Image (spheres, coloured by chain):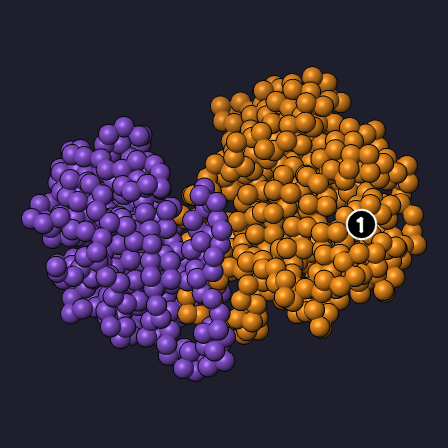
């Protein structure tokens, strides 16, 4: 098992999941890179994503009803931390950023969690199927006002965003196409729309909490007349419109850029895509070709992506999103493995760092990359990560300490720093950062696990070093 | 003695309304039937953010929905609650509350004044790890279900440890994250053996007597039963939490009846709509019992989340001396009351 293998596997797991502990990496490395990619691509072959769904609902009473947004956020974060299907959850997070649907307008967070569950089911499958499910998703229908789109009074909000933000991107269709697309989705609404609209308007949870929404197709409110859309003519309903959209080269390009930006390397933000070419046009072309060749199958595209050299070379070329930072750090430190009263803090933390899950700032989703970082969010990130490593008895912290100790009972500062930097990633820190870490450790001399017959001091010094490592610039990168 | 049948139970009415404070409940997890007809409803009130700490409380009301007051709040100080799990009343009318986050029992008088507390986290005799169900036995000793320690502990009312039984496992007499508890007129003890999907019966000394149910959705089967009660005839009522229903078993554990819930509007709910006529009109136009076309294996929670009358999170059951059944629903912030009718 080479250092290269471990570093590459850690890279894969940071992108296709939320990072991995050293023990997990060792299992994956023993299995091999391509086999691990296949395991990740087939979450359905892992029996259950979560062992303790019932425990969450038992102890967190509001994560049973999911009435409150922070409960829904906490539930999802806990699931990301503990899932045995990391890519399934990462795909859900990816699509949440693309099909951004927000609590602030819906006042119905559980309904957005339903959408997230749909992303788990469909996120690695056929893109046309995914678009169809998105179009039927009650949260999306409410979010983009399709419940207000009627045969005789078309609302163009969903039709426009379907083309602009969900498939093709600006500049690849006309206003007439928007109109025709919107007409095709008239009658796609939610049951009891009037009641739910009234309840949302006043944020009513009375008398007995919230009521789930369901999709409803109303043929009597659907515009069944002929439409001409992107050069095709027919009495199209939504399904035919989606088929036409998926056949457009612009859609392949748009999805390829999204996948590249989320899984490979930070790109300019979506609004710039019309004028700014991809950072790596060849890579985007490769993903586009895979999308078309495999009949818009996302799993096949992800297989190409994870096995591509451009992916393997792209280590630490992304700024961790707040969710990546929180979930990855918690996983590494070994916290939140059993439902506890502190769990809700996770939801608050990602918010402090600029990512309120289930409540993106707009239909465009979050701006990513370096836009995650400002003086306030950086402070929140560092403080959070440092707190996770403040307890030597946390399983993940203890595991790192034990592995360092296994390298020798007395070690030089340089040796300890190299071991810890390796076990925290492996990370790559620049020479100046490394020297600062070494100087800090050296101030108290060699690390001796048997000094005075007590390993406590050595463990605490390593704990302190780990807290410094998570405060480095390099730790902010994925 | 004649065997009870499904037809002998009638939905009576609903007590409840979502409320952050005052008249109503917030994720209620248990109810105790006190003196003079006072109901003590324990509100666990998620989530656990600072803003919502005041919503954690005990609401006092009557069967007829007269609001009598409330006491306690969220927090870690004496007299406060964090993850309250169960409530029981002693012979003096004092109110005992278990807390799964603070690993302690708190005692209040009948009017809600804090009296005392005990408990530390741990696995030693007399320590707790997420204490859940509470019940007084015939000797007025408090039985505490010690959830993560998979045991039942017995205490004097002032918190002196007397003994314990149970250990983790799925064998007869063993427990897996037990939750609710009840004592029948003979002094036998029933434990909702939550993760083993069964009810176990022990004698007053904790010797195993019987086990009822197995995993499943069929009659007499359970999914994560959370609460248990026994009436004067020995019939056993089970909050079949994971199946979103309540089941009734005969004294020997045979299936008798099941309820899925049929709540109407409570008085408090009616008051709300008197002041919110526009929402009421929308509600009257809507179909509150939509066809969901769920698959046979679909999670029943999805049905409960969509059909308001059904139980959603039936977490605790109690029976009063009139044979009335109280079903506490944590997700619907209410208690559905059923009564027995004579043939």
Chain label for disc 1: A
Residue B55 picture quarter = bottom left
Question: Which residue corresponds to the image point at 75% horizontal and 63% vertical from the top-left?
Answer: A225
Q: How many marks?
A: 1
Q: Is residue A465 left or right of A278 when viewed as pictured?
A: left
Q: Which of these two is toward me, A244 or A45?
A: A244
Q: Position of residue A332 (x, y in %)?
A: 60, 36
Give the residue number, with chain letter if any, for mark 1.
A244
Residue in view at x 83 percent, y 56 percent:
A233
In the rendered picture, chain B carries what hue?
purple
Q: Position of residue B130 (x, y in %)?
A: 34, 45
Q: Name which residue lies at 51% across and 38% down.
A: A50
Position above or below: A17 against A412: below
Chain identity for the colour orange used in the image:
A
Question: Which residue: 52% across, 71% down?
Answer: A195
Please tell me whether mark 1 sits on a helix, a strand or a loop: helix
- Does A166 sit left or right of B96 as displayed? right
- Judge by depth and name the residue closer to the eye, B296 or B37: B296
Side of A401 where A158 appears, left or right: right
Does B241 sit left or right of A64 as displayed? Answer: left
User: How far across and down, in percent of the image, does residue A209 sit?
Assistant: 45, 64
């Amino acid at each position: 098992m080479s250092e290269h293998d471990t570093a590459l596997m850690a890279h894969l797991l940071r992108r296709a999941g939320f990072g991995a502990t050293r023990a997990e990496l060792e299992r994956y490395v023993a299995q091999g890179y391509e086999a691990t990619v296949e395991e990740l691509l087939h979450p359905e072959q892992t029996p259950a994503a979560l062992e303790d769904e019932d425990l969450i609902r038992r102890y967190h009473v509001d994560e049973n009803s999911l009435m409150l947004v922070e409960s829904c956020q906490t539930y999802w974060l806990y699931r990301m931390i503990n899932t045995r299907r990391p890519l399934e959850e990462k795909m859900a997070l990816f699509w949440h950023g693309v099909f951004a649907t927000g609590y602030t307008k819906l006042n119905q967070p559980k309904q957005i969690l339903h959408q997230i569950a749909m992303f788990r089911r469909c996120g690695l499958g056929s893109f046309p199927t995914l678009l169809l499910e998105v179009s039927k998703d009650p949260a999306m229908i409410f979010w983009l006002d399709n419940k207000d789109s009627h045969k005789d009074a078309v609302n163009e909000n969903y039709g426009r965003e379907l083309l602009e933000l969900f498939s093709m991107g600006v500049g690849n269709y006309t206003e007439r196409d928007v109109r025709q697309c919107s007409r095709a989705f008239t009658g796609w609404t939610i049951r009891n729309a009037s009641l739910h609209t009234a309840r949302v308007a006043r944020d009513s949870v009375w008398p007995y909490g919230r009521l789930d929404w369901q999709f409803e197709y109303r043929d009597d409110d659907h515009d069944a007349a002929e439409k001409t859309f992107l050069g095709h003519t027919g009495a199209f309903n939504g399904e035919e419109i989606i088929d036409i959209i998926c056949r457009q080269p612009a859609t392949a390009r748009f999805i390829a850029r999204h996948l590249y930006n989320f899984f490979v390397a930070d790109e300019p933000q979506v609004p710039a895509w019309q004028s700014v070419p991809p950072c790596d046009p060849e890579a985007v072309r490769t993903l586009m070709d895979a999308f078309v060749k495999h009949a818009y199958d996302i799993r096949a595209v992800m297989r190409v992506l994870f096995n591509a050299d451009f992916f393997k070379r792209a280590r630490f070329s992304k700024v961790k999103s707040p969710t990546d930072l929180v979930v990855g750090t918690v996983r590494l430190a070994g916290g939140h493995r059993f439902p506890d009263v502190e769990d809700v803090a996770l939801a608050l933390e990602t918010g402090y760092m600029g990512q309120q899950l289930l409540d993106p700032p707009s239909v465009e989703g979050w701006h990513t990359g370096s836009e995650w970082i400002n003086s306030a969010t950086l402070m929140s990130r560092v403080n959070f990560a440092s707190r996770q490593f403040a307890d030597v008895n946390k399983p993940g912290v203890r595991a790192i300490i034990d592995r360092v100790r296994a390298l020798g009972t007395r070690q030089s500062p340089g040796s300890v720093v190299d071991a810890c930097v390796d076990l925290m990633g492996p990370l790559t820190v620049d020479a100046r950062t490394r020297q600062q870490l070494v100087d800090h450790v050296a101030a108290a001399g060699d690390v001796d696990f048997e000094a005075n017959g007590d390993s406590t001091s050595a463990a605490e010094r390593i704990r302190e070093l780990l807290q410094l490592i998570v405060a480095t610039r390099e730790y902010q990168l994925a | 003695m004649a065997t009870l049948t499904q037809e002998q139970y009638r939905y009576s009415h609903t007590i409840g309304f979502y409320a952050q404070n005052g008249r109503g409940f917030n994720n209620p997890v248990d109810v105790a039937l006190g003196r003079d007809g006072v109901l003590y409803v324990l509100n666990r009130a998620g989530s656990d953010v600072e803003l919502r700490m005041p919503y954690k409380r005990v609401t006092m009301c009557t069967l007829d929905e007269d609001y009598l007051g409330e006491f306690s709040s969220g927090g870690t100080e004496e007299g406060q609650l964090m993850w309250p799990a169960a409530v029981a009343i002693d012979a003096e009318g004092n109110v005992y509350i278990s807390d799964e986050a603070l690993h302690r029992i708190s005692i209040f008088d009948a009017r809600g004044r804090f009296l005392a507390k005990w408990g530390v986290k741990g696995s030693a005799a007399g320590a707790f790890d997420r204490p859940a169900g509470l019940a007084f036995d015939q000797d007025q000793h408090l039985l505490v279900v010690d959830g993560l320690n998979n045991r039942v502990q017995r205490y004097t009312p002032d918190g002196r440890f007397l003994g314990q039984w149970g250990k983790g496992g799925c064998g007869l007499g063993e427990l897996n994250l037990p939750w609710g508890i009840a004592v029948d007129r003979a002094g036998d003890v029933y434990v909702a053996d939550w993760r083993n999907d069964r009810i176990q019966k022990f004698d007053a000394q904790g010797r195993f007597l019987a086990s009822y149910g197995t995993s499943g959705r069929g009659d007499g089967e359970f999914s994560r039963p959370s609460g248990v009660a026994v009436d004067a005839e020995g019939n056993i009522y089970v909050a079949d939490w994971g199946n979103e229903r309540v089941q009734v078993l005969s004294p020997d554990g045979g299936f008798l009846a099941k309820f899925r819930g049929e709540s109407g509007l409570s008085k408090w709910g009616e008051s709300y709509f008197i002041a919110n006529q526009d929402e009421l009109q929308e509600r009257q136009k809507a179909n509150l019992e939509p066809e969901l076309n769920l698959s046979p294996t679909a999670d029943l929670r999805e049905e409960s989340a969509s059909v308001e009358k059904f139980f959603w999170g039936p977490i605790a059951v109690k029976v009063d001396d009139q044979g009335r059944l109280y079903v506490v629903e944590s997700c619907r912030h209410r208690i559905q009351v059923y009564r027995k009718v004579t043939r």
